[in-house]
Amino acid sequence: MPEKLIRIFIAVDVPQKIGKIASDLKPKVGANPSAVKWVMEDNIHLTLRFIGPTPPGELQKINELLSDIGRRHTDFDLTISGVGCFPKKERPRVLWLGVNGEVDALTSLVGEINSGMDQLGYPDDERDYFPHVTIGRIRYPQKVTPDLTEYLNAKYVPVEITVTKVRLYRTDTLPSGAVHSLLGTHQLA
């Protein structure tokens, strides 16, 4: 019997105050409240790589890869600031907080993760990496176009973070929302 696949991703944790910022931004989105699926405050993170369905037997190799990569990268600083949406404000699907600071260090880390995952048989989706923290998703983007004017003009005090480790998470979708379980923590040098 084949192993049951689990959905996994690689991320950087963000401070809890990011959840508070996201919560404060909710009323600034002009839409029926049910039109946006907000990320639960405890689940907000900076995704480095979504891997997707993976056999549990692969986790050791992925964790070893992340440990090796972590030893080749030093800590770096990022700033969570600004807001935006994908793909465009006329038809948004994703609402996010911006990431600035030592983005070159972040992009280098992500590039090495993508290269290593490709060698393990998990090819990259070929899109350029755009660092952001997802805080909400439009449930029916083809039917609902919320007024984002107030959201896109929102200001908040930027949050400084020092990236010292990357984490491997499992995600399970339950009726109450996504639940993330930690599968590995990998320190940077």
Image: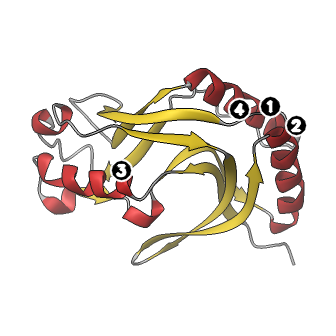
Foreground of the two, 112 or 140: 112
Checking the image for residue 119, the label placed there is 2
Is residue 45 visible to us here?
Answer: yes
Q: Which residue is mark 4?
A: 109
Residue 152 occupies quadrant = top left
Dot 4 surroundings within 10 Å: few (below 14), some, or many (20 or more)? many
Identity of the residue furthest to the top in this view: 104
Contact between marks 2 and 1 (CB within 8 A): the answer is yes
Q: Which residue is pictured at 20% across the width and 36% down the height?
A: 155
The answer for how far apart the CA atoms under marks 1 and 3 are is 27 Å
The answer for how far apart the CA atoms under marks 2 and 1 are is 6 Å
Q: The N terminus appears in which quarter of the rendering?
A: bottom right
Q: Which residue is pictured at 80% across the width and 40% down the height?
A: 189
The answer for how far apart the CA atoms under marks 4 and 3 are is 23 Å
Checking the image for residue 115, the label placed there is 1
Q: Position of residue 113 (x, y in %)?
A: 75, 37
Amino acid on which disc 4 is placed: Leu
Q: Position of residue 54 (x, y in %)?
A: 75, 59
The answer for how far apart the CA atoms under marks 4 and 1 are is 10 Å
Q: Nearer the viewer, mark 2 or mark 3?
A: 3
Foreground of the two, 175 or 46: 46
Q: Which residue is mark 3?
A: 135
Is residue 139 visible to us here?
Answer: no
Contact between marks 4 and 3 (CB within 8 A): the answer is no
Q: Which residue is pictured at 85% across the width and 40% down the height?
A: 71
Amino acid on which disc 2 is placed: Gln
Q: Nearer the viewer, mark 4 or mark 1?
A: 4
Q: In the image, is residue 149 above or below residue 66?
A: above
Contact between marks 2 and 3 (CB within 8 A): the answer is no
Amino acid on which disc 3 is placed: Ile
Q: Which residue is pictured at 36% across the width and 39% down the height?
A: 97
